[in-house]
Amino acid sequence: MLVSVEELSKTSLYSEIIQRITRGDQEAAELQILAAESLVRSYMSRYDNDAIFGTDISEPTYTGAEVELIKKMVKIIASYYLVRLANPNVNIELFRADYEDALKWLKDLQSGLVNPNLPYKPDPSVDTVTGGVWYNSLPKQTNFF
């Protein structure tokens, strides 16, 4: 996971609020974070998600400052998902407004209106040995009328 429950409790929701919502079940909070991370990943299809988020067997390899922005989006969405489960003394409208703003930013990211300095997916048409691009075409045809 890109964001841990401890990190979420330090930046977005107080740990006692998370404890009340999940009734002390750490796994419930982790599931909401995973759902938020999956949503963010789905909007980032042109970027190298394995380098940004990591995989099941490897840690993230890209550690640029822009990752903090992606983490913030995951935290906003995960916080909204948690607050929707139960609402112990928080203003849910504030969380909903943040959630809608995060989704708008992700849609802008997906459409190319915003372009953070994140690594793109590797191009499969580039030969990794020579660095060249391979292409071909049909032979030139001559038409007679």
Image: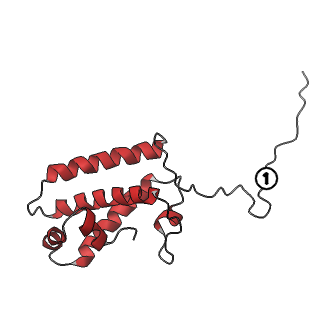
State the image coordinates of residue 54 (x, y, percent, origin top left).
48, 69
State the image coordinates of residue 77 (x, y, percent, origin top left).
29, 57
What's the residue at 79%, 52% (across, down)? 134
**Circle 1 crowding by C-alpha within 10 Å: few under 14, some 14–19, many from 20:** few
What's the residue at 45%, 56% (across, down)? 66
Q: Quadrant of residue 15?
A: bottom left
Q: Which residue is mark 1?
A: 134
Residue furthest toward the top?
Answer: 145
What's the residue at 37%, 45% (across, down)? 105
State the image coordinates of residue 117 (x, y, percent, origin top left).
52, 51
Residue 24 to residue 71: above or below: below
- Viewport quadrant of the N terminus: bottom left
Residue furthest toward the left?
Answer: 89
- Viewport quadrant of the C terminus: top right
State the image coordinates of residue 67 (x, y, percent, origin top left).
44, 59
What's the residue at 30%, 69% (across, down)? 7
Residue 15 to residue 12: above or below: below
Amino acid under disc 1: Trp
Is residue 134 found left or right of 116 in the rendered image? Answer: right
Which one is nearer the viewer's eye here, 66 or 136? 66
Q: Provide the secondary structure element on which disc 1 rests.
A: loop
Q: Quadrant of residue 13?
A: bottom left
Residue 70 to residue 138: above or below: below
Number of numbered markers = 1
